[in-house]
Amino acid sequence: MPVKIPVPIRRLLQTTSFWQDNSFLFKEFKFFGKAAIFAVVFTILGAAFEGFGIGFILTFLQSLTHPDAAQFQTGIDWIDTVILGVNAPVNERLFRISGLILLTTFLRLGFNYLGKLYTRISASSLAYRLRHLLFEQLISLRISYFAKKRSGEIINSLTSEVIQLQQAFDVSSALFTKILTLWVYVISMFLLSWELTLVSGMLFSLLSVGISTLLGRIREASFARSKASGGYTSVALELVNGIRTVHAFAAQDYERKRFYHANRNLLNATLQSISAQALVEPLREGIATTILIGMLVVAVTTLIPQGYLELASLLTFLFVLFRMMPTMRQIDSARVQMSSFHGSLRDIKQLLRKDDKAYTRNGKVEFTGLNRAIEYVAVDFSYDPNEPVLHNISLSIKKGEMTAFVGSSGAGKSTLADLIPRFYDPTAGQILIDGVDLREFEINSLRRKLAVVSQDTFIFNTSVRNNIAYALEDASEEEICEAARLANALDFIQDLPQGFDTQLGDRGVRLSGGQRQRIAIARALLRNPEILILDEATSALDSVSERLIQESLEKLAVGRTVIAIAHRLSTIVRANKVVVLEGGRIIEQGGYQELLSQRGKLWKYHQLQHKMSHVS
Ligand SMILES: Nc1ncnc2c1ncn2[C@@H]1O[C@H](COP(=O)(O)OP(=O)(O)OP(=O)(O)O)[C@@H](O)[C@H]1O
């Protein structure tokens, strides 16, 4: 029959289980093992010198109360005579012992300082490693993960929750130090009076178990706090990112409500946690003082008169007990804090888990270039299992040709194009490049030959130059300038206050929509891609910008295989092949004029746009 551990004892064990359950953190020790070993060694030395200090204090008190009695001796001649001065007059002996007490105190403080320093170094290194692991996890996850997760929650994990875990390490090592010191006290006390030590040990253990019952509540509250913190960061991040929309829709009151709600949730969760934490201190202080007074009464009324204990030992015992009280308080408060870190730990552990997340499978074949064609063979795709987005797509995109995807909004054009850089993989069927399944290629070698120009191309908050040469660290000044010229971007870049050195602000807020697109085109040009995906690059622009962009896109398209998605048919009249999609299915494909002559869907779109351009 399995042994059933009583709840309070289980709770007591939970402090250590914090680390036991999470061996993934221990694996990281190899990155800062030296610092951790130093931390342990210095901590042990600190505790040892605490013990020596107590020994010298006892000797001091004994020399004071019984100057003529036999003194404590180590048996090593020069230590006993030179350092302890056992044969010296009592005043000189006291003088020497005082010096020793002072010396051990300074050594203890020095080792404690070093122990703490190396603990902090280890904790910061753990945080550094966790951020590193989180980054590696985020960068290798499939894009679909980000569609489901709020960015604020991810930022919260990367910042606030990592800091909480850093503190957890700090606190747990403080716990280790204090427990070690506590043992030194307990042993010293045991040597002084085992009777008093046993009684006080039992009473203090009961107190500790009592406190453990509170830890469960604190742990539960920490899960809620972690969740509330993620919610709060999300709302704050959305406010900053969407500030234009907030103002444009006069939504300040709405956002205020959302923010206040998230802020209040965070406050409530924090209050719940700290109200349980705050109970611990007065509870233990009250009980501990009662225990102490009780013991004092027993010692003075029975143990000393009956000769079980001498006065010097009682005084030292009391000294140790008083020094021990803050240590015990720190142990309890460290246990309380450890319980409050469980939420952060769960959050980080959840994000680092690999078994419940999707990763892009990488192939081994180096992609050296397109020779014949990209072929979709009976491709199905769905973002959610129950909602298919593409059905039985078969089509061929020939090298050096322009293939256009046309269809109403939501027909699946972007999704179809997103399968080529493997943002997503087909749920059924295959995409082949020159007969080789896309999944066989080493993904970065494939992506290096591709460029995507879409209207939501991300502009980084760095200089124009770095934005154009994004991730191409060896691009020369001339190449960057030439790319900008071909993208019709040179004029406006030269007009910027610092030209190519101008910082573009978050998401390129300092540029117009058309300027952002021309930067995106220059970025694509510089990479000299073999395959180019143009996703609705010319929508939502005035006619001058559109003409400039159209011109640069035509330059960009020369000699490349182009997949173009455009609502404006004027931009794709020169396409070699037009694929018309509806509801995720191909309903027409062929040459532009050929499809027009069939008077099908493309013809209808053509008629519609023709009429609209006449109206405008
Ligand atoms: N990340 C996503 N998760 C779930 N569904 C998505 C996702 N992206 C797109 N969809 C859905 O897939 C369908 C096809 O979207 P897609 O963006 O491919 O259409 P589109 O033809 O490019 O539309 P538009 O011309 O409006 O850009 C839509 O019903 C859309 O709601």
Image (cartoon, rainbow, N blue to C red):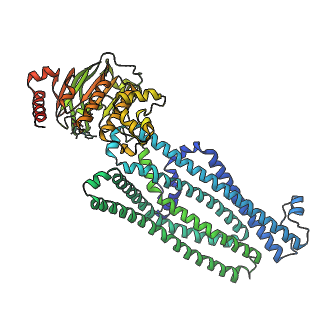
Rendered location of residue 389, percent (x, y): 22, 35
Residue 137 drawn at (x, y percent): 43, 40
Which residue lies at the image location 31% right of the left edge and 28% below the top edge? 552
Of 187 and 276, nearer the camera is 276
Q: Is residue 173 visible?
A: yes
Give x and y (percent) for residue 404: 22, 26
Q: Residue at x 41, y 62 (%)?
A: 221
Left or right, 198 with reference to 435: right
The quarter holding residue 255 reads bottom left
- Viewer-proximal residue, 420 or 613? 613
Image coordinates for residue 153, horizontal then vertical, percent: 38, 51
At horizontal 47% and vertical 64% (from top left) the residue drawn is 215
Is 423 or 33 nearer to us in this picture?
Answer: 423
Q: How many marks?
A: 0
Residue with the most extreme top position: 372
* Quarter of the view holding residue 604: top left
**Residue 210 shown left or right of residue 61 in the figure:** left
Residue 481 position (above or below residue 137): above
Residue 426 makes an appearance in the image: no
Q: Dividing the image into 4 quarters, which one contains the C terminus?
A: top left
Image position of 140 with respect to 593: above or below: below
> From what the image shows, is residue 486 above or below residue 77?
above
Q: Is residue 451 above or below residue 137?
A: above
Quarter of the displayed picture in which ligand 1 can be seen: top left
